[in-house]
Image (tube, grey):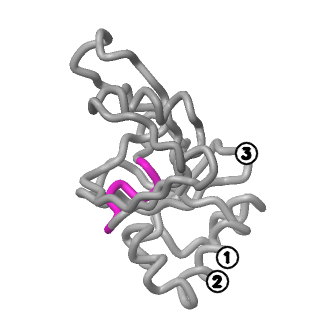
């Protein structure tokens, strides 16, 4: 089953079910308006979402109890969870850690080479998969770190 969040619909986006080939999607507000709501009620939402997914892939759209099927626009996608209560990050890529520490004026601790670094942070919002990453200046040294939900 593939689900995603559209940017439309407020701070938490709108939950959609996406076809296996990533070409079509359908909104499912009668099941859960957002992915966060679906996760909170997963035992009841998952089977219903999966039925929509199966129908979407079988071109059996008449049986879908949801909004109309539409062509998926990747630019319209938000992060899967546009906001999250928190995120936990395990940092293991040493060059990235060194750059981040240097930007803060801190050294990489010797223990990092033997013990993984993990931190917990709050989430104010995440970029969508095709959104531009805005930076104040490239003079800060552009670096990339991917997070997996």
Cβ atoms under marks 1 and 2 closer than 8 Å: yes
The part of the image, by quadrant, that contains residue 143 is top left
Q: Is residue 22 toward the left or the right of residue 78 in the image? A: right
Q: Is residue 144 toward the left or the right of residue 6 in the image? A: right
Residue lying at 48% horizontally and 28% vertically, measured from the top left: 144
Q: Secondary structure at mark 1?
A: helix
> Does 82 appear in magenta?
yes
Span colored in magenta: 79-85
Residue lying at 63% horizontally and 71% vertically, measured from the top left: 52
> Can you identify the residue that label 2 sits on?
47
> Can you identify the residue that label 1 sits on?
51
Q: Which mark is residue 117?
A: none
Count residues near mark 1 (Cα–Cα under 10 Å), then give few for <14, some for 14-19, many for 20+. some
Cβ atoms under marks 3 and 2 closer than 8 Å: no
Q: Is residue 54 toward the left or the right of residue 43 in the image? A: right
Q: Residue furthest top?
A: 139
Q: Position of residue 61 (x, y in %)?
A: 64, 63
> Can you identify the residue that label 3 sits on?
21
Residue lying at 21% horizontally and 19% vertically, measured from the top left: 136
Alpha carbon distance from label 1 to label 3: 17 Å
Residue lying at 54% horizontally and 47% vertically, measured from the top left: 112
Cβ atoms under marks 1 and 3 closer than 8 Å: no
Alpha carbon distance from label 3 to label 2: 20 Å
On screen, 115 above or below 139?
A: below
């Amino acid at each position: 089953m593939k689900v995603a969040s559209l940017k439309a619909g407020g701070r938490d986006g709108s939950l959609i079910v996406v076809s296996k080939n990533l070409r079509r999607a359908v909104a499912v507000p009668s099941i859960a308006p957002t992915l966060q709501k679906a996760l909170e009620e997963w035992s009841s939402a998952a089977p219903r979402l999966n039925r929509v997914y199966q129908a979407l892939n079988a071109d059996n759209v008449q049986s879908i109890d949801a909004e109309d099927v539409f062509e998926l626009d990747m630019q319209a996608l938000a992060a899967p969870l546009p906001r999250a209560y928190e995120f936990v990050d395990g940092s293991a890529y040493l060059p990235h850690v060194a750059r981040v520490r240097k930007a803060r004026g801190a050294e990489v601790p010797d223990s990092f080479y033997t013990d993984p670094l993990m931190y917990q942070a709050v989430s104010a919002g995440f970029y969508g998969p095709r959104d531009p990453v805005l930076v104040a200046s490239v003079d800060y040294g552009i670096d990339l770190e991917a997070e997996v939900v």
